[in-house]
Amino acid sequence: MNPKLVVTYTPPPSFTALLEDVRTRTKAAAALSADNTVREAQARVARRTGETLRSIHREETHDGAGYVVLVTRNPLPNLPYWLEYGTVAMTAKPFLWASVALEAGPHEQRMADAIRDGLAAAGYGER
C-alpha cells in the first residue's frame, strides 16, 4: 500500500494588490497624523483674529500618496512664517514645527503598523 502525498499550493496575492492595500492603509495613517498635526498647530498658534488658526489645514499630496499640512493665510501670506520664526521686531512664537515634532513618533508607529497589517492581511508574516 503506497501512501498518497497531496501537495496544495496557494499562490500569494499579486504584488500589485499588496502594494495597493498597503498604500490605502498608510494613507489612512497619514490622514490621522495630518489631522493631529493640524489640531495641535491650531491649539498652539498665537491669535488675535483667528484667521491664522483657520488657515491651518491639510491637503492631499499631488501624487495622492499622503497629506501635507499647510498654512495659507490671506491677505498676509507671510504672517505664519513671521509667527513661526520671528522677525527683527518680534520674537518667534513657534506653532507648526513644534506640532510636527510631537506627532513624529506616533506617526512612525502608525505607518509601521499599517505596513505590518497590510503584509499580514496578504499572508506575509504574522500579526
Image (cartoon, rainbow, N blue to C red):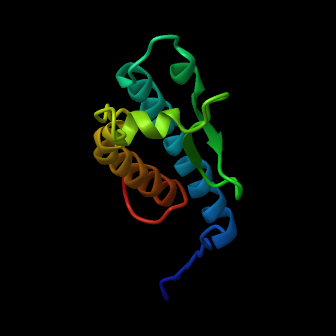
Query: Residue at 48% of width from left, 84% of height from top?
Result: 3
Report the residue that reaches farthest toward the front: 89
In the rendered image, residue 4, in percent from the top left (x then y), is placed at 53, 82
For image coordinates 59% across by 26% down, the residue present is 55
Quadrant location of residue 106?
top left
Q: How many marks?
A: 0
- Seen at 68% across and 63% down, the residue is 17
Residue 45 horizontal side relative to residue 59, left or right: left
Give residue 77's quadrant in the image: top right
Return the residue nearer the eye: 76 or 109. Answer: 76
Residue 76, image quadrant: top right
Residue 60: x and y, percent? 66, 45
Residue at figure coordinates x 30%, y 44% from the top left? 101
Q: Nearer the viewer, residue 66 or 19?
A: 66
Residue 50, placed above or below residue 44 = above
From the viewer's perspective, is 126 left or right of 65? left
Residue 119: where, in percent of width, then height?
48, 60
Name the one closer to the observer, 109 or 15.
109
The one of 67 and 41 positioned closer to us in this rendering? 41
Depicted 43 relative to depicted 74: above or below: above
- Relative height, residue 21 to residue 55 (above, below): below
Give the farthest residue toward the bottom.
2
Query: Relative to 112, does residue 79 appear above or below in the rendering?
Result: above
77 vs 125, left or right, is right
Q: In this view, does 94 lie to the left or right of 51?
A: left
Task: Indicate the position of residue 85 as horizontal and vertical percent values.
Answer: 36, 42
